[in-house]
Image (cartoon, rainbow, N blue to C red):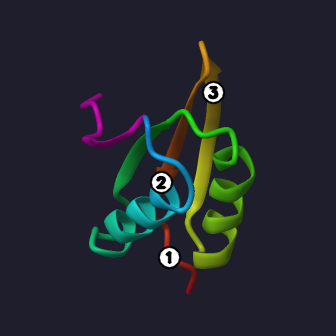
Amino acid sequence: MVDEPVTTLNLLGFFCPVPIHETRKAVETSEEGSLFEVVCDDPETLHDMPALCDRIGIELLAVSEESGEYTFRIRNSART
């Protein structure tokens, strides 16, 4: 099986609303099915990123935390 390409957004050091805005901008300019890994260190993203995904109809696949860094795996799966 071929590994799927992943776009990584390194948003360490940025506080709200920058991580949400940059994620939204990247997803909206991508093709449907694109996979993203968004890395943040703003704890507010734990609430804001799932809300963004729900609001614009993209899929939050996973959330992990390590040493104060939060990684969100997101797929652009626009609702029909």
Amino acid type at mark 3: Ser
Looking at the image, residue 22 sits to the left or right of residue 61; the answer is: left
Q: Earlier in the sequence, mark 3 or mark 2?
A: 2
Is residue 11 inside the magenta stretch?
yes
Tell me the residue at 56%/86% (across/down).
80
Of 73 and 39, which appears nearest the observer?
39
Q: Quadrant of the N terminus?
A: top left
Q: Nearer the viewer, mark 1 or mark 2?
A: 2
Tell me the residue at 36%/70% (across/down).
25
Amino acid type at mark 2: Pro
Which residue is the site of mark 3? 64
Looking at the image, residue 46 sits to the left or right of residue 22; the answer is: right
Which residue is the site of mark 2? 19
Q: Earlier in the sequence, mark 1 or mark 2?
A: 2
Which residue is the site of mark 1? 78
Q: CA distance from mark 3 to mark 2?
A: 16 Å
Residue 9 picture quarter: top left
* Chain part drawn in magenta: 1-12
Q: CA distance from mark 3 to mark 1?
A: 23 Å
